[in-house]
Image (spheres, rainbow, N blue to C red):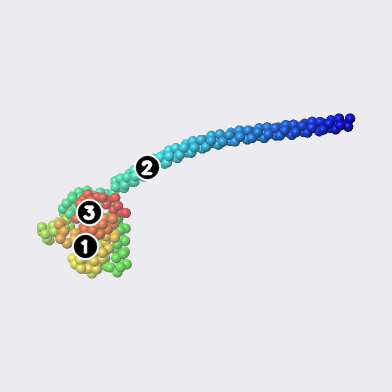
Amino acid sequence: MAEKDENYKKMSALIAGGVIMLAAIGYGVWQYMLLQTHADEQAARIASLESERDNLAQELTKTQNDNRTLSEALYSEQQKNAQFERQLEDLASTVGRLDKLSKTDEELLQKYSKVYFLNENYIPKKLSQIEQNYIYGSKDIYFHAEALQFLEDLMEEAKDDGINLSTASAYRSFDTQSGLKSTYQVYYGSGANAFSADQGYSEHQLGTAVDFTSEDIQGGLDGFQQTEAYEWLLKNGYKYGFVLSYPEENAYYVFEPWHWRFVGVELARDLHRQDKYFYDLDQREIDGYLISIFD
């Protein structure tokens, strides 16, 4: 009986151990299945995220390409606009230059002196009276209004440098030149042609030519080339737009050291640099300076 009980106990223990083992195995299988399911879910999520990443990468690439295309299109339009603006600026500049030229008397830089005729009806657009302190003696002398400031600046600079310089004559009308030439012809005959222009050929009619004099020669013209005033003009006249019209051995008249013509600072400066005179240049070359004559 005791032996039977002992066997029963052993059998019960084996069964209980088996049940426990089966329970442990079942629990392990269940845990494995849970872990596998979780792993599968994680793998699916990773795959989904990777797919989403790839889609986003494609979208980013497309967006970048679109941006690049838009940037190139924008740059192209900006270049077109810039070119258009430059064209407008060039057009405005051209229109401005043409407008300026249309308001500038083309006669002012023409060659005269037996070369080009200035008709009897020509009068400068505006003349202004030269102040008496710039004139030798007491008389009324007129000069081109837009060039007058240049003349006054020249006279003031000469004064500051201790140079005795005055104006003896400036604007002369067609009729005044005619009368003057007739007077010279009475005294000098045909010899007057060597130093006096016929009416219509005189630079004085333009209002931009001036005859200078000095106290050193009592307001006359003869001997002006021997004065300090003449030497000063040779060195400084161009700075104010004035050039010597008839230097020694010119093809038109005798040497006239007193006769200076306003041609604008730019042209006067270039003539000075090149050691040339106004009548050395072709008319076409001279015409290019007309737009800047009063600058």
Coordinates of residue 71 in the picture (x, y in percent)? 45, 40
> Badge 1: how crowded within 10 Å, few (<14), some, or many (20+)?
many
Residue at image position (21%, 66%) is 224
Is residue 174 visible to us here? no
In terms of sequence position, does the residue under pointer 3 or pointer 2 come before the other?
A: 2
Residue picked out by circle 2: 83
Check contact, mark 3 vs mark 1: CB within 8 A: no
Disc 3 versus disc 2: distance between alpha carbons? 46 Å
Q: Which residue is mark 3?
A: 205
Mark 2, other Cα within 10 Å: few <14 / some 14–19 / many ≥20:
few
- The residue under the point 30% across, 58% down is 150
Image position of 100 (left or right of 277): right
What mark, if any, has residue 258 been given in the picture?
1
Give how far apart the Cα atoms at labels 1 and 2 are.
Answer: 52 Å
Q: Secondary structure at mark 1?
A: loop
- For residue 188, say whether it is visible: yes
- Residue 3, how many percent across, how many down? 86, 31
| Point 53% across, 34% down: residue | 55
CA gap between label 3 and label 1 equals 16 Å
Q: Which amino acid type corresponds to the residue marked 1 in the rendered image?
A: Trp
Dots 1 and 2: beta carbons under 8 Å? no
Q: Amino acid at mark 3?
A: Gln
- Answer left or right for 133 relative to 32: left
Q: Nearer the viewer, mark 1 or mark 2?
A: 2
Relative to 294, 254 lies left or right: left
The quarter of the rendered structure image containing the N terminus is top right
Among the 4 quarters of the image, the one containing residue 248: bottom left
Disc marking residue 19: none
Q: Amino acid at mark 2?
A: Gln
Q: Quadrant of residue 73?
A: top left
